[in-house]
Every structure is written in C-alpha cells, then in structure tokens.
Image: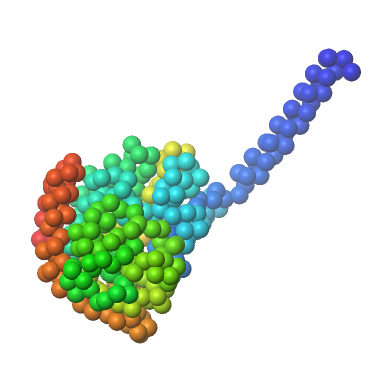
Amino acid sequence: MTRIESFRLAVRWVGVGCAVAAMGCAGDASRPLELKFGHVGAPGSLFALSAEEFARRANERLGDRAKVVVFGSSQLGGDEILLQKLKLGTLDFALPSTVMSSTIDEFGLFEMPYLVDDREHMRAIEAEVIWPILAPLTEPMGYRIIAVWENGFRHVTNNVRPIVVPADLRGVKLRTPRGVWRIKLFQAFDANPTPMPLSEVFIALQTGVMDGQENPFAQIYTMKFQEVQSYLSLTRHVYTPAYVTVGTTKWQRLPADIRDILTETARETQAFVHATAERMDSEVLARLEATGIEVNEPDMAAFIAASQAIYDEFGATVAGGADLIATAAALANR
C-alpha cells in the first residue's frame, strides 16, 4: 500500500467516525436532557418531599426538552461532595444547608441560635438579607442559589439524659453537620461536638461512637434515630434554610428559557416546602412520641442566655456580621 493509499484509507475511517459521532449526537439530542438533583435526605424527609415536588412541577413545564431526576439519601455523596460536583459540572442541583456556613463565612448568620422566630420571619430575612447580600457571595465560588427552601428547626436527641439546660450537654458526644458555628455553639454548651456525614449517623449512635445528634423532626424520624436514642429535647436551637443551588458554569450552558422555568418553579415550590414543614412539625413529633422516646421541654431562657457569646464572636470576626445580625433581628418586629 502506497503512502497516498494509506492516507486515503485514514481519511475514509475519519469520515466514518465523524458520521457515527454525528449520529450519536443526533440520538442524544432526541432524548430529554437529564438534570440531576442530589440531596442527603432520606425517603419521606422534607428534603425528599421538596425535591420530588420541584421535579414533578418542573418536568410538567419542561415537557420532552428536559427532565429533573432526584437522587436522595446521599446517593451522589454528602453535602461537600455535592458542592464539588456542582462546580465540576457533573451535577445540576444540590440542596446544601449548614455546609454553606463553612463555605462562605457570612452564611454563618443562620448558625446563630434563636435568630429566626418563625417562617414568616424567615421569608422577610430572605427578601432583605439572602437575595441582596448573601446570594451574590456564592457567584465567585462557582455557585448560584436559585431558591431558598428549608431544613427546619433543629432539636437535640441523645442517650445520656434529658437536656433541660445547657449544662446537661456537658460531655455529650454530639454529631453535628460540618458547620464551624454549629461546632462553636455546642462547645459553648460544653458538649463534645463532632461533624459527620448524615448517612453515617445512625451507626454512630447505634454503636455508641456518638451519644446524640441534632436535627429537625423530619430528619430524625426518617433517618430512624428514634430507634437508637432515648431522649428528644425540644431545643429549637437553630433554624436552617436550605438553598437550591446550581453550578454557574453548567447552568449558563442551559438554554435561557429552561433556566427561567427551573428558577421560577424552584421559587414557587417554596410555599409547598413551608406548608409541608409546618405540617410535619406537629405530625412527626406525634409519631416520635408514639415510639416511646422521652420528650422534654428545655429551659429556653437558659439556652438563649448561653448563646450570647456566639453572637458576639460572629459579629466581631465575620465582615459585616454585626450588621447582618441586627438586620435579621429587626425584621422579626415587622
């Protein structure tokens, strides 16, 4: 075979490869674009119900152009991994909560204990603080928040004793999410906090590696922590928002009208999230009580008084922290 014949044969194979590749591209284009939504919540949790409702609504509007597919229970990784995947473009949506305070200092605002009175107060904070001040801080990090949902009001469970005053937490090995201010908070209460992925907590409680944990009712119940915990103390110490978050690079590659549909739907879903969370607060607490776990009301004034040092530190060490606290607190009086 001459050199010219070899060249012509190579060109022919390149042409065939291009044709096959073109056919593959055409085939891919004929299928709906799959948009992956990862979160850490168990089936039946508020995270799961929220993401599934968003997917249902979005898919109705997207038709055969795209499809949101939800992966819960940390199937695609814990919060830190999900954020990395957003930045890499291998995931389309995640629902981070506490982890945002370890990613961007100012999000530690929502680690301040007893800051948020109720969901009406939270919606005011969203309008006046999150969208104009906090959300833009995610853009240089490679993220974009498109809606604010919730994880909810958090309570403490443990196997040592009922928690009535902060001193009752002394020495309790308590699992927390990976948030620097949550750790500081429980250190201030003399507990022994340790960050750990949610997917590992049940075994840690069952084996005694951890004495307790803190989460909203829905997470406690759906993760079955009541099966390995003796006491539930209604501390309501922190309200944690959850942020529907995308990676900016991949997000910008989506057609503008699809981005609009997804953003509008995510924000509209907030009403469902808040209504579902309010219903679950009472219904799930009743289910927890029915399991035999001992439930107690703590001395809230004692916890609030013990929390002041956290406010002082946040205000002194985070740029604009004192102003963020003052703005959020003032909105409760509207």
Residue at x 70% of width, y 31% of height: 18
Q: Quadrant of residue 84?
A: top left
Whether 151 is drawn above or below 29: the answer is below
Question: Residue furthest toward the right?
Answer: 1
Q: Where in the figure is residue 29, as x and y percent of width and height?
A: 60, 44
Asked if residue 54 can be seen in this view, the reply is no
Q: Where in the figure is residue 261, as x and y percent of width and height?
A: 42, 50
Pick the residue in front: 251 or 94: 94
Asked if residue 208 can be seen in this view, the reply is yes
Please indicate whether residue 86 sits to the left or right of residue 6 in the image: left
Residue at x 31% of width, y 48% of height: 102
Q: Quadrant of residue 141?
A: top left
Q: Quadrant of residue 155?
A: bottom left
Pick the residue in front: 171 or 232: 171
State the colouring used for the structure image.
rainbow
Question: Residue furthest toward the top?
Answer: 3
Residue at x 43% of width, y 70% of height: 207
Picture quarter with the N terminus: top right
